[in-house]
Amino acid sequence: MKNKEVLLERMERYALTTFGKRVDDLNNNEKYVVLAKALMEEIVPQWLKSQEKFAGKKQAYYLSAEFLMGRALTNNLINMQRKKEVEELLAELGVDYNQIEDAEEDAALGNGGLGRLAACFLDSAATLDYPLHGYGIRYQYGIFKQKFIDGFQVEEGDNWLEYGEPWSIRKGLESVIVSFADGDVKAVPYDTPVIGYGQKTINTLRLWQAEAVKEFDFQAFNEQEYDLAVKAKNDAENISKVLYPNDSTDEGKLLRLKQQYFFVSASLQDLVRKHKAKYNTLENFHKLHAIQLNDTHPAVAIPEMMRILTKVEGLEWSKAWEIVVNTFAYTNHTLLAEALEQWSIKLYKKLLPEIYTIIEKIDGQLKKELLAKGVEAKELDKYAIIHNGNIKMAWLSIYGTKSTNGVAQLHTNLLINQELNHWYKIYPERFNNKTNGITQRRWLLQSNPELSNFITELLGSDAWITNLTELKKLEKFADDQSVLQRFMEIKKMKKEQLAAYIKRVEGIDIDTNSIFDIQIKRLHEYKRQLLKAFYILDLYYRLKENPDLDIIPRTFIFGAKAAPGYFRAKGIIKFINEIAKLVNNDKEISGKIKVVFVQNYRVSYAEKLFPAADVSEQISTAGKEASGTGNMKFMLNGAPTIGTYDGANVEIVEEAGEENNFIFGLRVEDIAALKDYNPKEEYKKIKGLQRVVDSLVDGTFDDGKTGMFKELHDALLIGASWHKPDHYYVIKDFESYREAQQRVNDAYKDRLGWARKCWINLANSGKFSSDRTIDQYAKEIWEIEKA
Ligand code: CJB
């Protein structure tokens, strides 16, 4: 009771001082802000204490251009174990908690899996009492907001800071200067607490905002040159203005390079400054810091640290190199060629000439080392960091760190045996696997309280919240009818909640008795949303021909943003929306199938979608999805996977059994063995396939004269200058996918049998907690200890 009174008193105070009103008179957004501020008053003292307990110990830092945190309010209340109390307090004030929750904008400072992984890692580390802190960029605009107009994706700016952001604290006095060839920029840190479950440890996410060193040039202003007076300010602020909306593609733009160096240099200066203040030397830096590079985006940390150590601090080159290699570790998140970052020498020289010189020196040192290790001179080009006018950031990252890891076993095997095999031969001890994970606090406890309560009830304990392998004990209920019945009731409830939400925000009615078949992830050709689209269209035509076709009603749900410049991805969105229009408006189909492409898929939408899924679509071309993490979120909420042998799907099936999932399609080795693949011939041989593929160009659908549909058609049947026809094997895998979908349909008819599959997936999802992943990073790479 007392806690509640204190909280209310704090809320009243913030209402008065921030908005000049009483709590009762605030709108929902304002209420959300004062609630968060009132909570921060309680959080901050504990945060400070948490920092003290790690003083003098080795700590880890996660350098990432993306942190896809989503909303913080409910997550924080859950981790503080105060959600119920706050709900009650608000109810007493006549306020609905859900409306306050809904008032918070997503912190969407990431594109997809890579950024969300960073967020899950922070949650896990704090919960496990590991000192792990995030360093990144405080983008003023996060990933764009997506709308559909006439079925086309339209982007809008995500001005998430507009109504205030109560969880971060500006630490102006800890600003640092970052120097570029064209001038200096001020990096101002904003700190956000990362609260572990149970609130024992509160770590820090420090995001840098770019500002002008000199806000305003009065000289120029006095001389009536207003533009010039604000130019420096605008140029500086542009650096942290907007997140690049590319998932797994590298844009190579000057501003992006500025962003990378900006946050990396600021973060390293910050760490070095604090370390020196305490120890007055940097020789032991690696003994107290482990720095993980989240993909190559922060790889410039390697030469930047060399610069600081040798040029600023005066250490010997070789001593500095030893510190650098022992401090940093690198995670590779993709094998897609277009995502492997390369920067043009020209750009680097122009913006960061000193850093470029250091990279040259590193490259020279590498060559000597390779020769000494017996590599032949003619082989050196394969390893060259600087080659053909470009700097290869992945090579720099492998050479300049003590550890390179992949994010699922299959992915790591491909790195070791193929893509990075030549590096593996030189440094086998550096390579390791860290299969990704997700935090069960957000993806089960928060997003599915109904299932969470049931699990706790059955287990007689909520230990699973911090030890997900406890779920294994649920397996003994796999044949308990009443348990499976309750599971199905909960699933139905989550489907109804989702249906109500979709009705409200999309204006579409969906049947909660139908199978909810969900594919939610970024739009990319390799993820093959198009394969599902072809399947739906084929099913539609089969239903038209045979209205008695024996199928269980299905709702096909998609959620995906396409990078604004990715023409084909946008074409796929339009194509699916055209199919939706055709199918959903056909009275003859009478609700047997429905297609919904939800708008603006994001973390807070995902929290509603995963728990409501009956089927998890993980249908990437084998070898292309490094891991996937959405696959794990579905599994944790008890949805079987229809998927290929790719990424972490392999491990999911290993844990839950192939008989409880629906595996189809070519495997990595099948693709490698394919010879003379001719999709133009093959697509004629598969019943129904030609009809749906050709619907792209035969007038069935209208792409508004954009040429989008022809582009997709050509990519499948003709190819392009940079790829062969159907290089993601959509046509090749179609029949196998259709057959797997038939197996889904047949399995679903046996309601208890289906529930059993769901249950076994849930019970075996323990491996995929990011708590397990973080524990492995902490022990095997960072060598840090719990508080
Ligand atoms: N990934 O989200 C991205 N962006 C990239 O630029 C490269 C990879 C994804 O990272 C996830 C986390 O490791 C993986 O699960 C996913 O397969 C990969 O595409």
Image: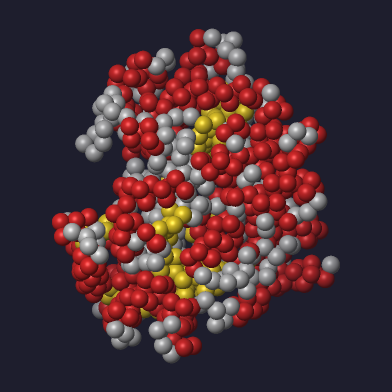
Q: Residue furthest left?
A: 378
Above or below: residue 266 compared with residue 153: below
Q: Is residue 74 left or right of residue 350?
A: right
Q: Residue furthest front?
A: 374
Above or below: residue 574 compared with residue 87: above
Q: Position of residue 659 (x, y in %)?
A: 60, 31
Q: Position of residue 12 (x, y in %)?
A: 72, 70
Q: Residue furthest right?
A: 1
Q: Position of residue 129 (x, y in %)?
A: 62, 68
Q: Is residue 444 left or right of residue 386?
A: right
What coloring was used for the rendering?
secondary structure
**Residue for point 37% across, 50% down:** 415
Q: Is residue 453 left or right of residue 411?
A: right
**Residue for point 72% across, 28% down:** 752
- Closer-to-camera residue (142/603): 603
Q: Is residue 169 visible?
A: yes
Classify residue 427 by image quadrant.
bottom left
- Closer-to-camera residue (364/723): 364
Image quadrant containing the N terminus = bottom right
Image quadrant containing the C terminus = bottom right
Q: Position of residue 177 (x, y in %)?
A: 36, 78
**Residue for point 44% across, 69% down:** 291
- Closer-to-camera residue (60/560): 60
